[in-house]
Image (tube, coloured by chain):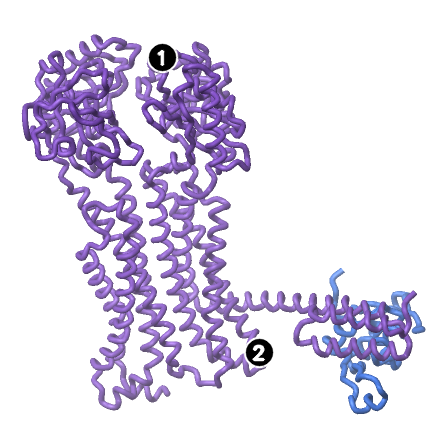
Chain colours: A purple, B blue
Amino acid sequence: MTPRGGGSGRRLALMLVALATPLVPRHLRADWRREWQAEIRVRAAEGGAVVLPGAGAIRHALWLRGAALQRAGEQTLRELRFAARGLVRRPLFALGVTATLALGIGATSAVFSVVDAVLVAPLPYPGGDRLVEVTSEYVPWEMAGLPLNATLLEAWRARAASIEAMEAYNVGQDHLAGEGPPMVAHNARVTAGFLTDLLAVQPLRGRTFAPEENEPGQGGVAIVSEDLWRTRWGGDPSVLGRTIRLDGAPHEIVGIMPRVALLPEVDVWTPMELRPGDAAEIFGSMNTVARPRAGVSLDEVAADLLRASELAAEEAGAMAEPWRAGVGDFRETVVGDIRTDLWILMAAVLAVLLIACVNVANLLLTRGADRRHELHVRSSLGASRGDLLRTVVVEAFVLALAGGAAGVALAAVVVRVLLGSMPEEIPLAAAVAVDGRVLLFALALTGTTALVLGLVPALGAGRLSRQGMRPRGASLRRGERRGGKWLLGAEVAQASALLVAAMLMLSTLQRMSRADSGFRPEGLAFVHLELPPHAYPEAEARTRFLQDLRPQLRAVPGVRALGVGSATPFSGMTFLVGMQQEGGPRTGASDGGINFATADERIAFSQVWADPDYLSTLGLPIVQGRPLRPDDAEGPSVALINETAARAFWPGESPIGRRVRVSNDDPWTTIVGVVRDFSHPGLPTAGLAELYVPYTTTNRLVNILVRFDGSAEVLERHVQEAVWALDAELPIPAVGTAAEALRASLALTRFYAALLGTFAVLAVLLACVGIYGVMAYSVARRAREMGIRLALGARPGQVAGSVLGEGLGVVALGLTVGLGAAAYGTRVMTTLLYEVTPTDPATYAMVAALILASAAVAAWLPARRVSRTDPAEVLRAE
Amino acid sequence: MPARPRAMSVATAAVLRAVIQGASYGFDIMDATGLPSGTVYPILSRLEERALLTSRWEDPAAEREAGRPPRRYYRITAVGREELQEAVERFRALGHPLPEAS
């Protein structure tokens, strides 16, 4: 029963009203509450039921709120249409704003798509956000970070409970023959689960590997990459079932695999032969990747694997005993040093976006000033402050949305360009795409931009209600002028900082391209030969081949000298060894005074096996002692070292006659000469201590250096003819030139310089457009003031000068702030720079000059108009 | 069916008629139509918004003498009468005459 008239019923009903009150739109609230309270009180006084009718208050309140929301929605839609129409009527304004925003949002989204794929997004594989690299430490030598061997893989996999999958790969170069001309192919040997489980990639055609194919003698199958399939077989599907030879061994093609983002260079996939317990394979070559169970942290995985390896050391026998497991973030392995570089690019492009936003904000401010008249009219017609606010904010939103949409379209184009020019040092390129994540990012950017842009006119509209009606075209208020100038200063500051970064990068590139390598790169070529073990199993076969090849090559027209070694400065391969000097300690990271690439790199010398002509062909002079001689290969062990090594081990002394050895089992090697360093920043082994020992064909690596006159193409053809005359089955020897290799080694630097340069140019251009816009507007709006000053006798030059001076003052302030910020911010670039410091005075001076000059032009163009002003005309217009 | 501005629901017509017949406060209208307050009040709000009704507050002084708070007083407008008339005729034509008020 409903309580009748009782005080409790009344109280309950009034409580319901109080409860519903906040739901009622603010402007109706007071009346609404008064009405309901009155009705309930009257009814209760009459002794009527009030609880049930009182409950209706909630429904009424909800209805009113709903109606208000609907009205607001309709209003916003109307405003949207209104704004769109307004913008269509001012196509230049709309286009300028949209294009500026599109540029900013597009470039930022494009760079983000790279940063995201490489650094942020989970790797594009199952559990891609938690993949770890598993390495082994050889405890007796305290050498960590080593690849695994098959014994360890099996022993640890079986004992680590936190691991869901643990698989291994190893990419090498194999001699591919059959079904086309011989070639050197990147062959990825993998455990069966690597493709099917860890990467979970599907073949385009055919199948992946079965676990039993990893067993010794059970391989003989291969999956070819889609790229190779298309180039070598023209995409012929009947390739499945055919046989190719990899290093002479027949392999049946069982599948075709699309490009794998992690290992884009792979041509052929084959099953890795696993021989757990094989004592011959102490040091493994298995790059091992593991997927921990979901929710297990990296630390937990590390602890679990360490425990598993200790357990294995006890249980699994001698092979597992001296080893301990180590774990690292797999992304770090994949990404390497690129991380900081990419964030620098991201910061740079964000600065461009900010400048674009500032420009647009400036445009909106000036437009806001122009619209004041319109807004005043609407205000006098009864539009509330909220209505006016909505009008301007909605317009900003429409502009931001248009800019965002155009930006995404632009990003798609820019990403294509980026991918086309991206050096291969940047990993995971295949995973870069304008995908959902990038769209989301662009959306967030657009939203933020809209918010910021909406705020600018909103502040303007806020002022509107506090001031009286003013005639159209009234001169600018002080605060308004200042607001525009502040933004201008910020813009100039960012453009200057960005320009500093770009100039530093450009001067790095310039210095790198001019760097003295220590040898003459002109007329120097190098040939890398793979002598496959199946065809050249013994050193004798290789010696014979080289003995036959040398005179053939010397006979090639234009060849002046040639030398053979295990590596060239261009091959990127280096054989690092630890070194012990007689009577001295074994070198390590902490001694020897040598700068190692990483703290973990405990091994000091890059060892090169070189024949007697190697160094003279390269053009590195002997600065002390004697060169290697033909008879050194057979005699007592001798070696040359480079200047870096000499300085590090025997500072201030002559190293000639000193003795070193790699390990305790080796004979002592006597240093007989010192060679000039080669020192090019683009060469991977530059700056290392080098040890040159006599070349022997026990070494399988054949790198030939050639000094030649004439064209590299002709040389390449002759070299190929000479090689194939001896062995038609050898893969096409790659002939490179030193000049080209040095150029290519700068690809990453060039890429950064190009991007930073583009961003800086955009930034400066946008800033100039901004300066021009603000100055032109200011001049136009102050026409009356100028007219009066001119009429009062000021010379046009004076008036123009004051305008110009006012603009350049802001520019100078922005420049100062920008250069200061650059001096602080560019320190993160130190590792990218070469022979130029982040605070290089010349660079800063140049940037200051460039900014001032372009700003002066941008400010002068509108200021010039002042001097052409006819004061009479201006005053008449008033 | 698309809602035309003049299509009036039975409940709305009932509220309007109750106001014509002299019910001028929310709860009185509720009693006159037999509709719950949660239905009557949104209708009142909408009718006022569409200017078919107007409302004013009672003179507080007069009511203080009567010993009760001032109430909101609804009155039909000329447009309201017109639209109610049309609606009643339409209902009749459709064979659904408006039920008599209780």
Judge whether residue A169 can be spotted in this image.
yes
Q: Residues within 10 Å of mark 1 (few under 14, many from 20)?
A: few
Is A324 left or right of A818, judged from the image as shown? Answer: right
Per the model, the C-alpha gap separating discs 1 and 2 is: 88 Å
Q: Position of residue B82 (x, y in %)?
A: 80, 78
Residue occupying the point 36% across, 75% down:
A482
Residue bearing mark 2? A383
Q: Amino acid at mark 2?
A: Ala
A235 to A99, vertically: above or below: above
Q: Position of residue A584 (x, y in %)?
A: 17, 26
Whichever of callouts 1 and 2 sits on the residue coming sooner in the sequence is 1
A91 or A240, which is in the foreground?
A: A240
- Chain under label 1? A
| Quadrant hosting residue A537 | top left
B100 to A265, vertically: above or below: below
* Residue at the farthest front position: A583
- Chain under label 2? A
Dot in front, 1 or 2:
1
Q: Amino acid at mark 1?
A: Ala
Q: Residues within 10 Å of mark 2 (few under 14, many from 20)?
A: some
Q: Which mark is residue A280?
A: 1
